[in-house]
């Protein structure tokens, strides 16, 4: 234990009575310690420990168990290690209050008194207290949730507001902003078992770090009004399926505020509802109860899932290789498109220098290669004598509608847009799988790393297939 402060002390040294004030370390200074001597060799003003077996020794005082010849039995302290206890007892930290000592005194007790579990069969009446583990701390008094509720006592599970783990009973931790799970304010911290902040669903929980001993998760008593109301999740944390939320902070621990998923919970299409993170990853997680991509089970079943973004017509691959090894891949995720063409804007020109008419584009992939390409012939649908370099902008247009642009029209970037493998010079660029629409604004700045993955020069292996679909 640490003696935090001694307001005054008196020691008899060289027949003089002196007083002192100050704080002491965990291990009091002894006469053998040079730091304990004054200039004349006097013993400094430090209260010496009186170990068990020494005349005047008092159970519970500093280092009472320090005598190797007289180890402490259960209920005796202050101890500093298990070696200072006997009879199968261990030195339990900061359990002094259970035995009528200061809370920071360490007392020898049976090993089960330090396992964070309620061992009723061994006489405990609460986790690590009762019976041979000493008297459980008195119940906290006052209003749960008050700023000072856990200050002068150790809060039980579900009680707060706490400020640190030391204000919670043994085996508990002070949670963070988990008040709504216990009917308290969103910014209140409540004592709970450690499992309630491990990011997993375990030991009686009905959700990740919610339910059972971890509280309701923030909904119910914490939130009031009509679910879906504009302010329903304000001032509380909504549980899974509750909304309308405005951000993850308004959802219970382990949940996220999804976008426009209201219909899946029988709410308006523009409403945002709290759900588990897997409900927003764009994948079918059958093991999590989903029956469709981000729908079904905890992701909601009462409405259709939000429609995916419309798959448009866009460039899906770009090859600027050696010699005539040039190619463009176009992906059509919609219906048949007619009247389409590719326009080349060379070296910053604001007007196209070359226009290449395209055949009707059916849904799927269409690949256009340079007629002198030596690598890309097998997957190419059409060959033409078009030529472009890394500093030329390329536009895909159908009728009067611009669908996609590579580069920035009217701007000469010098050698290329981008850098390294994700640049328009001497590289292959392949559209990221997260992209399903083109960049129809040809005059905005262009950074290929935002929507494209880069590959080494003359890479044709992915041409002819939108492999991620």
Image (cartoon, grey):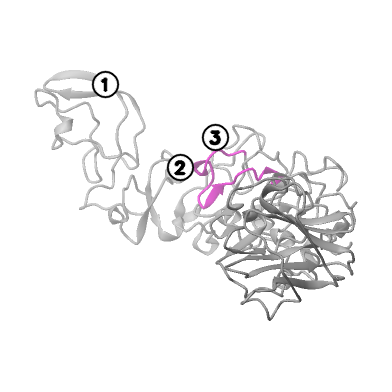
Residue linked to disc 2: 97
Q: Which residue lies at the image location 89% right of the left edge and 54% below the top edge?
A: 400
Residue linked to disc 3: 151
Magenta region includes residue 177: yes
> Disc 3 or 1, which lies upstream in sequence?
1
Snapshot quadrant of residue 200? bottom right
Q: Residues within 10 Å of mark 1 (few under 14, many from 20)?
A: few
Depth order, front residue of 81/368: 368
Q: If the image is split into quadrants, where does the C terminus sit?
A: bottom right
Depth order, front residue of 376/289: 376
Identify the element where label 1 is drawn: strand
Q: Residue 120 at x, y = what percent?
A: 55, 61
Q: Residue 232 at x, y = what percent?
A: 82, 43
Residue at mark 3 to residue at mark 1: CA–CA distance: 29 Å
> Disc 1 or 2, which lies upstream in sequence?
1
> Disc 3 or 2, which lies upstream in sequence?
2
Snapshot quadrant of residue 105? top left
Q: Is residue 423 above or below residue 469?
A: above
Q: Which residue lies at the image location 59% right of the left edge and 46% below the top edge?
A: 175
Q: How many marks?
A: 3
Kindly check if marks 1 and 2 are in contact, taking CB atoms under 8 A apart as contact.
no
Magenta region includes residue 391: no
Q: Using residue 159 as the reference point, say whether residue 116 is left or right of it.
A: left
Depth order, front residue of 435/265: 435
Residue linked to disc 1: 20
Residue at mark 3 to residue at mark 2: CA–CA distance: 14 Å
Q: Residue 296 at x, y = what percent?
A: 81, 67
Q: Which residue lies at the image location 34% right of the left edge and 34% below the top edge?
A: 3
Depth order, front residue of 317/216: 317
- Whether residue 469 can be seen here: no
Magenta residues span 161-182
Q: If the image is split into quadrants, where does the N terminus sit?
A: top left
């Amino acid at each position: 234990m640490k003696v935090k402060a001694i307001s005054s002390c008196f020691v008899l040294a060289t027949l003089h009575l002196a007083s002192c004030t100050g704080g002491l370390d965990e291990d009091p200074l002894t006469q053998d310690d040079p730091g304990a001597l004054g200039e004349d060799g006097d013993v400094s003003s430090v209260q010496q420990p009186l170990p068990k077996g020494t005349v005047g020794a008092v159970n519970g005082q500093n280092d009472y168990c320090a005598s190797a010849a007289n180890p402490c039995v259960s209920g005796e302290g202050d101890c500093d290690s298990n070696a200072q206890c006997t009879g199968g007892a261990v030195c339990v930290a900061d359990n002094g209050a259970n035995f009528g000592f200061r809370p920071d005194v360490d007392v020898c007790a049976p090993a089960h008194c330090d396992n964070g579990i309620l061992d009723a069969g061994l006489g405990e009446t609460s986790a690590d207290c009762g019976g041979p583990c000493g008297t459980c701390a008195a119940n906290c008094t006052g209003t749960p949730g008050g700023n000072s509720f856990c200050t002068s006592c150790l809060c039980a599970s579900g009680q707060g507001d706490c400020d640190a783990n030391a204000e919670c009973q043994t085996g508990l931790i002070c949670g963070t902003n988990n008040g709504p799970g216990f009917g308290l304010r969103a910014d209140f911290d409540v004592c709970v078992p450690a499992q309630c902040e491990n990011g997993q669903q375990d030991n009686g929980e009905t959700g990740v770090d919610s339910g059972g001993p971890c509280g309701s998760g923030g909904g119910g008593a914490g939130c009031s009004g009509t679910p879906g109301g504009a302010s329903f999740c304000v001032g509380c944390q909504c549980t899974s399926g509750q909304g309308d939320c405005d951000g993850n902070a308004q959802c219970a621990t382990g949940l996220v505020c999804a976008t426009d998923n209201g219909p899946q919970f029988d709410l308006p299409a523009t409403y945002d509802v709290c759900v588990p993170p897997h409900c927003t990853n764009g994948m079918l997680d059958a093991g999590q109860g989903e029956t469709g991509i981000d729908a079904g089970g905890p992701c909601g079943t009462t409405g259709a899932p939000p429609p995916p973004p419309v798959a448009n017509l866009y460039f899906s691959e770009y090859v600027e290789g050696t010699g005539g090894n040039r190619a463009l891949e176009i992906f059509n995720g919609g219906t048949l498109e007619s009247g389409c063409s590719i326009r080349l804007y060379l070296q910053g020109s604001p007007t196209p220098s070359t226009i290449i008419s395209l055949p009707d584009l059916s849904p799927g992939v269409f690949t256009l290669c340079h007629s002198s390409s030596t690598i890309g012939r097998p997957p190419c649908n059409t060959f033409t004598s078009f030529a472009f370099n890394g500093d030329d902008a390329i536009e895909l247009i159908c009728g009067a509608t611009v669908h996609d642009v590579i580069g920035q029209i009217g701007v000469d970037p010098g050698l290329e847009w981008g850098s390294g493998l994700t640049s328009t010079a001497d590289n292959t660029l392949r559209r990221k799988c997260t992209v399903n629409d083109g960049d129809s604004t040809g005059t905005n700045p262009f950074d290929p790393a935002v929507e494209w993955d880069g590959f080494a020069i003359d890479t044709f292996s992915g041409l002819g297939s939108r492999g991620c679909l």
